[in-house]
Amino acid sequence: MPLQLSRAICGKITRMKFGCVVSLAIVLLFIAHASAQQLLPGEREAVVAGIPGVIDAGTKWQLIWADFKTADGIVGTPDGGVIFAQEQTDTIRKLDVTDKEFVYLTDTHGGGSVSMDAQGRVYAVQRTCTDSARPFYQSCPELPMISILAPDRKLLANSFSDGKTLGRLNDLIADGKGGAYFTVGGAYHVSANGAVTTVADPTSIRSNGIMLSPDGLTLYVTNNTSVVAFDVRPDSSTSNRRDFATLNGDNGGDGMAIDGAGRLYVTANKGIHVLSADGKYLGMIPTPRRPISLAFSGPSKKTLYVPMMGAVGPNGKEWTTPEGVRNTAMTIYKIAMVAEGFKGRPK
């Protein structure tokens, strides 16, 4: 385990009014995990069987980060690191190629999922006041919105075309044209000039994750137990909705990533499902916890970074999220891949 992780754990627990002496038990658990691959509280067996061209059998997961706050919408960065949103602290965090943590952006207004386009513009869904556990929930008038956060800030939208608010936004993927596709019950597109159009309404899909093919001509949306695909027109509108693949009996389809061969990686309750570019089911990469998003990065973009639900608490047991608070504790793992992430854009 990197030294900075143990220091970070100590610091975080101290800020939460737990003694750093108590946190040493957690540090020792992380060290044991890194050296002996023994299961930590809350983890499950994750023996990788191998998928040809994707991942070698027996490859081990490595725990690189943990906190009692979220790590959502992870995206690779051009320097081999990753960025992810932390809603509770209104920040976007970064892990560099050595897994050292930095604050990447502040004042994100409840930033959730993150995307980055080939020009380096950072997009985010901003959930603002939609978490009832946040202290200002009752009095906050700020609407949820989709924005470009860097290099310059630009509001794209804070309402649908009929004037209704966006609600608690979920995932998004930059469209490469200054706009983005996003999910919140259904699937939608917001253009660079702020026009919001419907891809699939909430009555016809149970959306969560959203992703574009390497050529940008196919849009993928998770639909709980399956993935739905759409053709993308030059004006970013969509057509030809079709069932692309199922998750082999799993459910809870969540965040997605794409590799250089066009294979689609879909997080769900049991692990990461791998689908070929034509929708053939290739296999599952089991995970030590329930994964929610993922991204290729690292040297040659051949490392998969995956935020997963839960973490070890200060008592050395699985962290229990306080009642009324959304999914706080999370752990990020990484794993070496044979497959190489798509290099035409960050994700």
Image (cartoon, grey):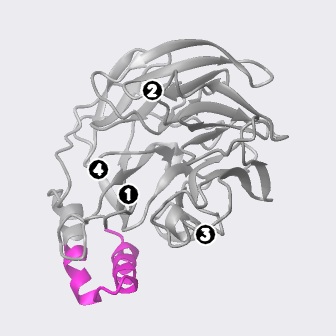
**Would you name the residue on which mark 3 appears?**
139
Give the residue displayed 69% in from the left and 42% down from the top.
164
Amino acid type shown at disc 3: Ser
Q: Is residue 242 left or right of residue 165?
A: left
**Would you name the residue on which mark 4 appears?**
61
Q: Are marks 4 and 2 in contact (CB under 8 Å)?
A: no
> In front of the other: label 3 or label 4?
3
Mark 1 or mark 2: which comes first in sequence?
A: 2
Q: Which residues are magenta?
A: 1-28
Amino acid type shown at disc 4: Trp
Alpha carbon of mark 3 to alpha carbon of mark 4: how far? 43 Å
> In front of the other: label 4 or label 1?
1
Q: Is residue 234 left or right of residue 261?
A: right
Q: Are marks 3 and 4 in contact (CB under 8 Å)?
A: no
Compared with residue 341, is residue 15 higher up or lower down, i.e. above or below? below
Mark 1 or mark 3: which comes first in sequence?
A: 3
**Would you name the residue on which mark 2 appears?**
223
Alpha carbon of mark 4 to alpha carbon of mark 1: how far? 22 Å
**Residue 2 pos. (x, y %):** 36, 70
Give the residue displayed 45% in from the left and 44% down from the top.
294
Q: Which residue reaches farthest right?
A: 193
Alpha carbon of mark 2 to alpha carbon of mark 3: how far? 34 Å
Amino acid type shown at disc 2: Asn
**Would you name the residue on which mark 1 appears?**
327
